[in-house]
Amino acid sequence: MSPLQTLDDPALLTLLKEGNAAAFDVLYSRYWDRVLNLAYRKTGDLMEAENIIQDVFVSLWTRRDCLNINGNFSNYLFVSVKYRVLKVLARQKTEQAVNIDQAGELLDDSTQEYLTFEDIRERLEVLIGNLPEKSRLIYLLKSEDKSYKEIAAELNMTEKAVDAHLLRARRKLRVELGSFLGTFLL
């Protein structure tokens, strides 16, 4: 038995941040079975569950130097697995929809698709109009393929400020449009 196995998670995480591979191995051995069981229950596919867990631990190792876990490590790990499972399930659902579409099992309803596209386009225009003035202006200038530097010069601000406004605008549009699509498609 390794002396590291007697250490608690916070002590092992401290060693992990320092690049201690043995501490990583102890955490891996300590939690592998439990998180694998969770992923398998959610996906129903052992191979996919193993891939998810492997991805989580690889991410943990590659981000070890900037890792900042304030709470319980097991909770962090289970939440990480949960989000990876959700991403995998969403990807599988998309793949299934593509496969169904490719098999010709869906009816071609181009008029409905056009109306759906128009609804989305109109909603996007409204959302852009509701953005704060500076964010809206930056978003519209960027949609004209202007560079951050050009936008910053035109609006007399820094490129970093342009980036911050654009990031906030895109995030707000994504959230608002996502909730619209969720209710629209149901």
Image (tube, rainbow, N blue to C red):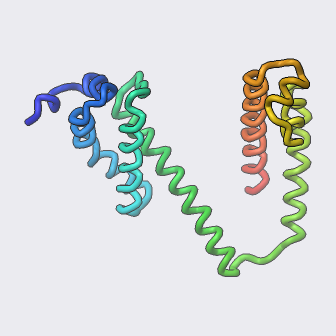
Q: Residue 72: x, y in percent?
A: 36, 27
The residue at 85%/59% (across/down) is 116
Q: Which image quadrant is residue 131 in?
A: top right
The residue at 72%/50% (across/down) is 182
Q: Which image quadrant is residue 177 in?
A: top right
**Does 173 appear above or below 119?**
above
The residue at 89%/35% (across/down) is 141
Q: How many numbered marks appear?
A: 0
Q: Residue 36: x, y in percent?
A: 33, 51
Picture quarter with the C terminus: bottom right
User: Can you name the residue that lies furthest to the bottom here?
Assistant: 104
Q: Residue 56: x, y in percent?
A: 40, 44
Q: Which image quadrant is residue 179 in?
A: top right
Picture quarter with the N terminus: top left
Task: From the viewer's side, name the closer residue of 102 and 86.
Answer: 102
Q: Is residue 167 left or right of residue 66?
A: right
Q: Is residue 27 left or right of residue 119?
A: left
**Does 46 appear above or below 126?**
below
The residue at 79%/53% (across/down) is 184
Q: Is residue 34 left or right of residue 162?
A: left
Q: Residue 149: x, y in percent?
A: 81, 29
User: Can you name the residue that lies furthest to the left here?
Assistant: 1
**Does 94 appear above or below 83?**
below
Task: From the viewer's side, name the closer residue of 7 and 158.
Answer: 158
Q: Is residue 112 left or right of residue 169?
A: right
**Does 76 appear above or below 105?**
above
